[in-house]
Amino acid sequence: MPLLLDDIEAVARRDRKDRQVRRYEARVRRAMRKMFREQRDALLRGSSGLRPYFRESEVEDELVRAWNRAKESGVLQAISVVQEVDPRVRALGFTSAADDIGVALTFDIQNPAVLEWAQTRSTNLVAGLNDTTLDRLRTVIRDGVENGDSWSTVSRNISERFGEFSGERADLIAITEIGEAYEEGRREAGRSLQARGVDMEKRWLTARDDLVCPICAGNGDAGWIRFDAEFPSGTQSPLGHPGCRCDEQLRAA
Ligand SMILES: [Zn+2]
């Protein structure tokens, strides 16, 4: 029953990724929640300027000013967590990929290039999150103006929006950030094995549950393909999208 054995192996392989990254995901999730909480508190503390002329056209400019004062709150802590966690997760992806092939490769998490990579990643991540947060705050403000809401209603809505950030959004950020770091490590091991003359194949491993999207399912159905080939969705390797929980497996061709 070669197919069945293959399936069991695929499930075990992906479970290994889950086990390896779970606690790192949890750390990033906690760091993001804390950052959002501190940003919310700083914004609400510093946005009393919005109160007197709420409903006027300048309200959005005032929001941007208040947000610019508040947005650095908790950011350094969040960045330092991501910066610490990313190289470790990249190392896990790297060594697990080498393990797939049965080759022992080591990954140096203190390598300056690795540290710089993590620094750039974490900084870009938080900058992107802050842009999205401001966009969402603008929507809250616009809705408030449109509805003729009072400032106390609008500030409550802002607070609620930040509460949402600490839930699903923090989960999505953690899964995506950790997943990308892990898969980056795997690709790197794959490239380095290939450079040593190992001829390889890869396959896309989904979680095989109801949450798997059609794009990732299609990549999973493709089975084993050559290491440098594209999966049906046109990508070289997971993640397929933000929040993607897929993994990749390598073998010698
Ligand atoms: Zn996926």
Image: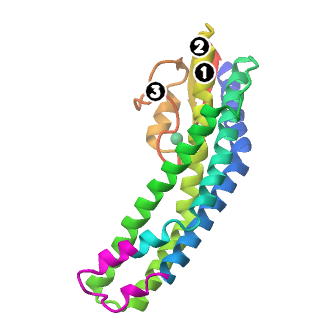
Q: What amino acid type should be assigned to the residue bearing mark 3? A: Phe
Bounds of the magenta segment? 46-65
Say if 205 sits above or below 118 in the image: above
Q: Does the residue tagged 2 have its C-beta within 8 Å of any atom of ligand 1?
A: no
Q: Which residue is found at the position 47% from the left and 85% from the top?
A: 156
User: Residue 9, image x and y in percent?
Assistant: 70, 28
Q: Earlier in the sequence, mark 1 or mark 3?
A: 1
User: Residue 196, image x and y in percent?
Assistant: 63, 9
Q: Which residue is found at the position 47% from the left and 74% from the top?
A: 161
Q: Which residue is mark 3?
A: 231
Q: Which residue is mark 1?
A: 190
How many marks overall?
Answer: 3
Using a 10 Å C-alpha cutoff, classify the residue at mark 1 as few (fewer than 14 neighbours), some (14 to 19) or many (20 or more): many
Q: Are marks 2 and 1 in contact (CB under 8 Å)?
A: yes
Is residue 45 inside the magenta stretch?
A: no
Using a 10 Å C-alpha cutoff, classify the residue at mark 3 as few (fewer than 14 neighbours), some (14 to 19) or many (20 or more): many
Report whether 148 appears left or right of 176: left
Q: Secondary structure at mark 1?
A: helix
Q: Secondary structure at mark 2?
A: helix
Using a 10 Å C-alpha cutoff, classify the residue at mark 2 as few (fewer than 14 neighbours), some (14 to 19) or many (20 or more): some
Q: Nearer the viewer, residue 8 or 24?
A: 24
Q: Which residue is found at the position 62% from the left and 26% from the top?
A: 249
Residue 194 is tagged as: 2
Q: Which residue is found at the position 49% from the left and 72% from the top?
A: 70
Residue 208 visible in the shown view: no
Q: What amino acid type should be assigned to the residue bearing mark 1? A: Gly
